[in-house]
Amino acid sequence: CFYFAAFHEAKKYAPKGPVSTSQKVLSDLGAGFIAGCAAATANNPFDVVKTRQQVRAAGAVSSHAVAQEFAALQSSSCLGVAADMIRKDGLGSLYKGYVAKVARLGPGSAIIFCIYEQVMGLF
């Protein structure tokens, strides 16, 4: 929901009236980049908690050292895992991998939305 909402909100700041094709492409790229960053920001805590739960579930494999560490955590619910992470490592722990995610989603979303808008303009 953040992805499309951010794209449409960002498009409100695009130039109005007749614009050149290059201006349209640039505004679509910018709005798409903003959408990707917004989606990454909103989704990252949930993604980190999900990954922790998946690794914790791998705790049954004795050779999986990281899973053994996470298996020792008491909580298994989403909120419990998030609370444990915040208590142990602070709020920033919910944003591990954020830079890599934004580096992928920002430009990728810019290209996807730009192409979508250009194709829709043909119809």
Image: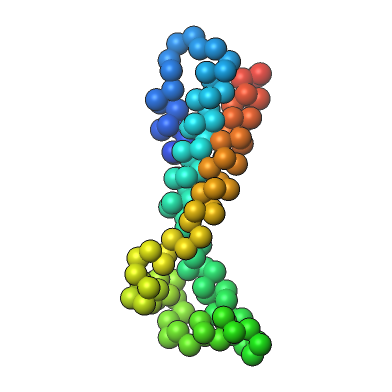
Give the side of residue 87 with respect to residue 118, left or right: left
Q: Is residue 92 positioned above or below 24 on the image?
A: below
Q: Position of residue 31 (x, y in %)?
A: 48, 32
Task: Write the residue at 43% across / 86% down.
Answer: 74
Q: How is the image coloured?
A: rainbow
In the orientation shown, which residue stands out farthest toward the bottom?
Answer: 62
Residue 83 visible to an observer of this rendering: no
Counting labels gives 0
Q: Is residue 92 positioned above or below 102 on the image?
A: below
Q: Quadrant of the C terminus?
A: top right
Q: Position of residue 35 (x, y in %)?
A: 48, 40
Give the side of residue 109 with respect to residue 46, left or right: right
Q: Is residue 28 positioned above or below 96 on the image?
A: above
Residue 112 visible to an observer of this rendering: yes
Which residue is nearer to you in this view: 103 or 7?
103
Give the side of residue 52 with respect to residue 80, left or right: right
Quarter location, residue 109: top right
Q: Position of residue 80 (x, y in %)?
A: 39, 76
Q: Position of residue 118 (x, y in %)?
A: 62, 24
Which residue is nearer to you in this view: 60 or 108?
108
Task: Write the residue at 58% across / 48% down.
Answer: 104
Task: Write the residue at 35% across / 65% down.
Answer: 91
Task: Write the residue at 64% across / 90% down.
Answer: 62
